[in-house]
Amino acid sequence: MNIEQRGPSKGEIKAAVMTILSRHVGIEKALGMGDLYSQAYGRAWRHRINDTRELRKIITELRYEGALIGETRSQVGGGYYLARSAHELSAFFKKRKREALMKLHLVARMQRVGLAELLGQMQLNLSSSSANATEDTQKGLFDGGA
């Protein structure tokens, strides 16, 4: 019987990503998703979206854990990197906040309310769920506010 060999564990992939990105400090040394994937997993991806989904989740987890992983989406030289300076972090945060506000603006338009009203509603939802902040906040933010 042929038993399929298991790939590296999530913890091993996380460690590998941080090790790999430690050689890519600064936006100018950004490493593309395909290269990061092949180095972390030891194989090339077959389907760009499906195969790299888990790696994108791991990058998000590492960010939640405090890793200063930035990204650039330029056509040439785009990818992931470890932020070198406060300026790089600030630029990354500014971009992410703008993207978040644009998405919230879309939700507000679809709900036919102003962005300020939507943000106020969200603030109330966040305040009222402070007992179980993490769980309730995620539910409130991701269930459409229902």
Image (cartoon, grey):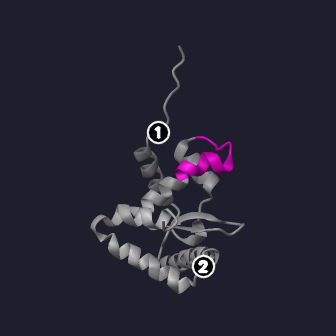
**Which residue is at the front of the view, 22 or 11?**
11
What label sits on residue 8 in the rendered view?
1
Residue lying at 71% horizontally and 66% vertically, measured from the top left: 76
Residue 23, position in %: x, y? 50, 60
State which quadrant residue 130 falls in. Answer: bottom left
* Residue 36 inside the magenta-drawn segment: no
Side of 101 where 68 appears, left or right: left
Of helix, strand and loop, which mostly describes the magenta segment? helix
Side of 130 where 144 appears, left or right: right
Q: Which span is picked out in magenta?
A: 43-55
Q: Residues within 10 Å of mark 2 (few under 14, many from 20)?
A: some
Q: How crowded is mark 1: few (under 14 residues within 10 Å), some or many (20 or more)?
A: few
Q: Please determine whether, in this image, residue 138 is positioned above or below residue 100.
A: above
Given the current orientation, which residue lies at the most extreme top position?
1
Residue 15, position in %: x, y? 42, 51
**Which residue is at the front of the view, 83 or 114?**
114
Mark 2–mark 1 distance (CA, rounded to whole Å): 40 Å
Q: Specify whether residue 54 is in view.
A: yes
Residue lying at 51% horizontally and 80% vertically, measured from the top left: 118
Q: What element carries label 2?
A: helix
Q: Specify whether residue 86 is in view.
A: no
What label sits on residue 105 in the rendered view?
2
**Which residue is at the front of the view, 43 or 97?**
97
Residue lying at 48% horizontally and 76% vertically, measured from the top left: 89
Q: Is mark 1 on a helix, strand or loop?
A: loop
| Amino acid on which the number 2 mark rests in the picture | His
